Image (cartoon, rainbow, N blue to C red):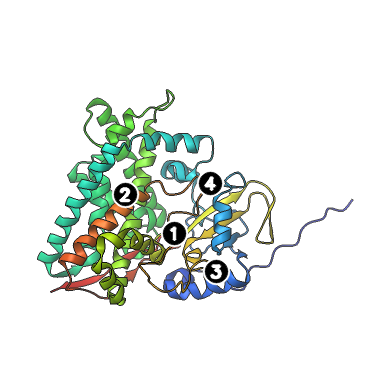
Amino acid sequence: MSILVSPPRAYDPLSVSHLDFWAATAEEREKTFRQLREQRPVSWHPPLEGALMPPENEGVWVVTSHALIGEVSKHPEIYCSGRGFQFEEVPDDFLQAAGSFLGMDAPRHPALRKLVSSAFTPKRVALIHEQIKAQAATIVDGLLAAGEGDFVEVVSKRLPMWTIYEMMGLDESRRDEAAHHADGMVSWADEDVAAGREPGEVLSDALVTLLTMGMELAEERRAHPCADLMTALVQAEVDGERLTDEEIGSFFVLLSVAGNDTTRNTISLTAKAFQDHPDQRDLLMADFDGRIATAIEEFVRYVSPVMTFRRTATRDTVLGGQEIREGEWVAMIYSSGNRDASVFTDPDRFDITRSPNPHVGFGGGGPHFCMGNFVAKMQLREIFDQLLHRAPGLRLGEPAYLTGNFVRAVKSLPFTVR
């Protein structure tokens, strides 16, 4: 009796798996993504180089078109999140401790989102907005006083860190430490961040510290409630169910990473985009209040701060004409979907009036659409209100980027302001 064995698939000749690919600029990567989008929107690639642990999978399906990213996003029953959401292999305990609802499927995923959402009452959202307004003004005060320096350190990094940790009620003395470890969660492979340590050590230290901070703060707020989000989370109850300390700790890790990195890099790269496209800056300034909401959608599309997310096939299926087997990885390239010419006219152009703008910067729809997008939009509105009106003499140099396949991260961005 003979057993038929399927021959191994041939990897795509345009590999996105090499470290050199992710060390290149977004513009260089887009050349490859454009070719894949137009010719092979679902393509098979080797496991990524430089992963934290040896891959168990033979490869990964890479999805580059806007339409197919939406199809994967909106069918969690076929493409699940519970088996991992990153482009590379990471330990299971990392997924459980750091992923929060990013790494969950139904029924736990909607239940946890409902519990967390219940803490964001209209009154709390209004308070968060007022905090962000005050923070943005103070940060631009500091920019003007400094006159020169690193825009990431002085502006981009400060606002999301301040917002997230003030919102959660973390003591000021611990916020810099928390932000440092949030960096470690996504930049463990960067030599400057690792500072001679092994990548696994960087990731482990960052995860344990943030998880402990979150759980300790939850315990403290149960005993001593305050007017902050952590208190609302520990008191949140839906259908008789409450969040556990472990779930709150994991959410604190997620908020530290997702809430810091994405907005930080959107601020940095949008500020650079306005310098490179002064006509768009002038257009926004001519009617800031009338155009800022539409402009923010373009900020997120143009920058695409979160570049990738992956799912795992729960069954044999077909996507974009390709036969995908149960258990195989499917990676969505958001930065590619946001440059899809079949959806966006002149997609490489920075256009603050672009409407409609169905970008996938907050996800491609479905149950995992970013629930914190409203906070990010508040931050972007308030910081650019301050920067554009109060710092017209701002001049930026060239950004230095972090090498990675998850977040399009700017390590530093020199500035002067007249």
Q: Which residue is mark 1?
A: 406
For disc 1, the neighbor class at 10 Å (few under 14, some 14 to 19, many from 20) is some
| Residue 199 at x, y percent in the picture | 40, 57
| Residue 284 at x, y percent in the picture | 28, 67
Query: Is the residue 110 above or below the residue 406 in the image?
Result: above
Whether pointer 3 and pointer 2 mark residues with C-beta atoms closer than 8 Å, the reply is no
Q: Which residue is mark 3?
A: 342
SS for tag 2? helix
Whether pointer 3 and pointer 1 mark residues with C-beta atoms closer than 8 Å, the reply is no
Q: Which residue is mark 2?
A: 375
Q: Specify which label sits upstream in the sequence, 4 or 1.
A: 4
For disc 4, the neighbor class at 10 Å (few under 14, some 14 to 19, many from 20) is many
Q: Specify which label sits upstream in the sequence, 1 or 2.
A: 2
Q: Which residue is mark 4?
A: 81
In the rendered structure, which amino acid carries the disc numbered 3? Ser
Q: Specify which label sits upstream in the sequence, 3 or 1.
A: 3
**Distance in Å between CA atoms under marks 4 and 1:** 16 Å
- For discs 3 and 2, the disc positioned in front in the rendered view: 3
> What residue lies at 32% left-to-right and 57% top-to-bottom?
263
Where the C terminus falls, by quadrant? bottom left
The residue lying toward the viewer, choosing from 272 and 146, is 272
